[in-house]
Each structure stands twice: as C-alpha cells, then as structure tokens.
Amino acid sequence: MRTDSFKGKDFITLLDWSKEEVETILDVSLDLKRRYATGEYHDHLLRAKTLFMIFYNQSLRTRNSFEAGMTQLGGHAHFLDPDKIYTPALEGKEVAYSTERVSDVARVLSRMGDGIAIRCYGDPVDWEYGGANALLHEFARWSDIPILNMEDDKYHPFQALADVLTVKEKFGGFKGTKFVMSWAYSPSIHKPRAVPQSAIIAASMMGCDTVLAHPPEFDLDPEVIAACEANAVMNNSSFTITHDFESAFEGAHVVYPKAWAPKVFFKPPVGQDDEAGAKRINDRYKNWKMTSELMETADHEAIYMHCLPADRGWEVNNDVIDHTDVKRGWKSVVYDEAENRLHVQKAVMTLVMGGRY
C-alpha cells in the first residue's frame, strides 16, 4: 500500500490502524532489520529529524530502543524527564510553577521537532484507568506532529507490534497459530493492562487463534474484548476467554503469561479503588506461574514470550525464560522479542515522521 498516507498519523493504539496498515509496518520492520543485520546504513530515512520523548515512568527497553532507532535512522531523540521540565498536565490539574498545560507543551514542541513520544501510566495519573490515555489524546489534539504511545494505562502498541513480528518470524505467519495471552502471578499489583490488551488486539487482528486466560477478577476492557471478537470474525479465526490457567496452554504455539492488576484496583467506575482488596485477590492465584512442565503441554515447537522485565520465580521459572537457542522443541524468545522493539519502532517512526522510505 502507499506509505505516504502514514505521514503525520498518531500511533496511540492499534485500534486506530487497519490490518493492511499493520502488515505494511511489519514488512518495513523486516526490511529495516535486514539492513541493520547486514550493516547497510539507512540514516537518510530520518536525517536531521527530532523525536521528543517524555517519560513519566522508568524504562529500559523502550527508552533505549527509541534512542538507538532514531540514531540509526539519522535523527536524534531528546529525553525529557517530567521532573526536569514543567510537567505537562491536563487542564484543571495544573500546579503553579511546577506544571504546564498539555496544550502549550504540545504546540511548542510541534514547532521544534517531528514527533512526540510519551510513556505514562499508574502513579502519575493516580491509577485512574484511562487517565494516561486521555493525556496522550490531549497531546494529539494540540500537536501538529505525530504522537507515539510508548505505553499508557490502556495500550502498549509498540510492544504488540514486536510481539506479532516475533510470531511472524518464528512461524512464518499467523493463520492456525494459537496465541495464548495469560495472566500470571506477581507479588506486585501495580501493573497496568496495556500489554495484555495490546497483545490480544494485535494477535487477533493478524489472524491468530487468540486465547485470553485470567482469573475471574482480572477482566480486561470490554472495548478491547469487543475489538478482538470483531477481529476473529474478520479473519475467520477464533477468540476465546478462559479462567483455567493450565488447560489454556494445551497445544499453544505462543505462550505469553504476564501479570496485571485486578479490576478492583482501579478507580471507579472501572473498579473500586481498593488496593488492599486487590492484594488479597492477587494472592489467591500464586499457582498461576509458567513452568517447564506446563510448557510441555504446549505445541512441541512453542515459544515463550514476555515483554520484560519478568518477575522471575513468580510469573515464570528460570528454566523457562532462560530456555533459549534450542534447535527443535519449545524455547524462550524473549530477547528476540525485545530486539524487535527496535525494528518496529524504526518502521513506525519512518512512516509517520515523514521519512523517505
């Protein structure tokens, strides 16, 4: 498809993008990955372009993959710590001499660069579900340059792209691939829904037979569930939800156990704003952990995936996450998956920030 139609488009959720557009992004990602592997410079694609990165939360993979990606594309990434600038805030939530309204920040940065990437979830918005996503949409409302979502409280679209790129590389495609996104236990309940929600959106959009497994108290967003059901109809594939941890992985090609907070943890109207109650619910399910015995119930050549950082010993045992470089048989691909963050982000930045691809 024509790639000039991507220019200037925000990348906040995959729900705003078509399957054909996502397929184009994956194709560009693979091309840029090949160029990187063969040492072919491609620093003309975003030469002299600037990406502003605003991190309300800490980061390892996201910050470094964006910075490295902009360098490889010939541009520059500016790291902006909200504590070291006037923190961008929504109207009505300003604090004198410590914040600056989003509308002003977005319009100023639009005059100076070519893209604004933002990570925000959890404490910066008091765990109000959708609060961080609203912040990104307010940036998009006022910005003349693309807004890129480096993870908010609803979506992590770049992680989802890396996930499905990894599936495409390992299995050659998506049709007939059983993709299981499951909740797993962590002693920390301070985990957003962004990764599982974006993972099932991407997997179902590309045509995987997608399974969502979680205890009853860990429901995901009804809007996301409805989108996955529609994707399954579009692709003549399946989307199912189960509360049985062990049976979910039987015959699975993709095994993706990841913790997220129970529904009651979030503020009303989504939940009850009950942290103590959330902790009690969370601790009922300590047996939801990925083990090598469970991996043996999956497909013979299944892959274990995780966005990282994984809570080793709780979400997953070491002998699973470290089971890599296996010629045949199931294996962990978490580092391939992490590397693919670099390539999918380079593809999206090239396409939406006006690169000459």
Image: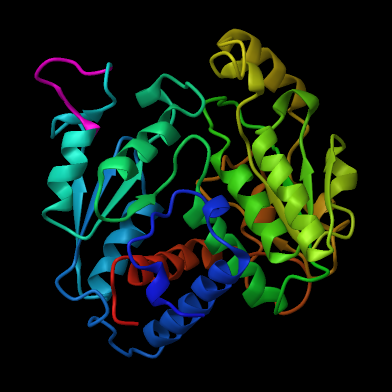
Q: Main secondary structure of the magenta part?
A: loop
> Left or right: where does residue 38 sit relative to residue 316?
left
Residue at x 72% of width, y 75% of height:
171
Vertical placement of residue 254 versus 42, above or below? above
Above or below, 36 relative to 191: below
Residue at x-position 50% and y-position 46%: 309
Residue at image location 71% in from the left, 28% down from the top: 218
Task: Work out which quarter of the rendered image holds the C terminus and state it.
Answer: bottom left
In the picture provided, is 204 more to the left or to the right than 244? Answer: left
Snapshot quadrant of residue 336: bottom right
86 magenta-colored: no
Q: Horizontal placement of 240 versus 110: left or right?
A: right
Measured as percent of width and height from the top left, residue 141 is found at 32, 41
Left or right, 220 with respect to 105, comes to: right
Q: Position of residue 291 (x, y in %)?
A: 76, 48
Q: Residue 241 location in percent, x, y?
A: 83, 41
**Residue 65 position in % (x across, y down):** 36, 61
**Which of 187/208 is in front?**
208
* Rendered position, 225 above or below 29: above
Highlighted range, magenta: 93-102
Which quarter of the picture shows residue 226? Answer: top right
Display colour scheme = rainbow
Q: Nearer the viewer, residue 188 or 21?
A: 21
- For image coordinates 73% across by 39% down, the residue present is 289
The total of numbered circles placed on residues is 0
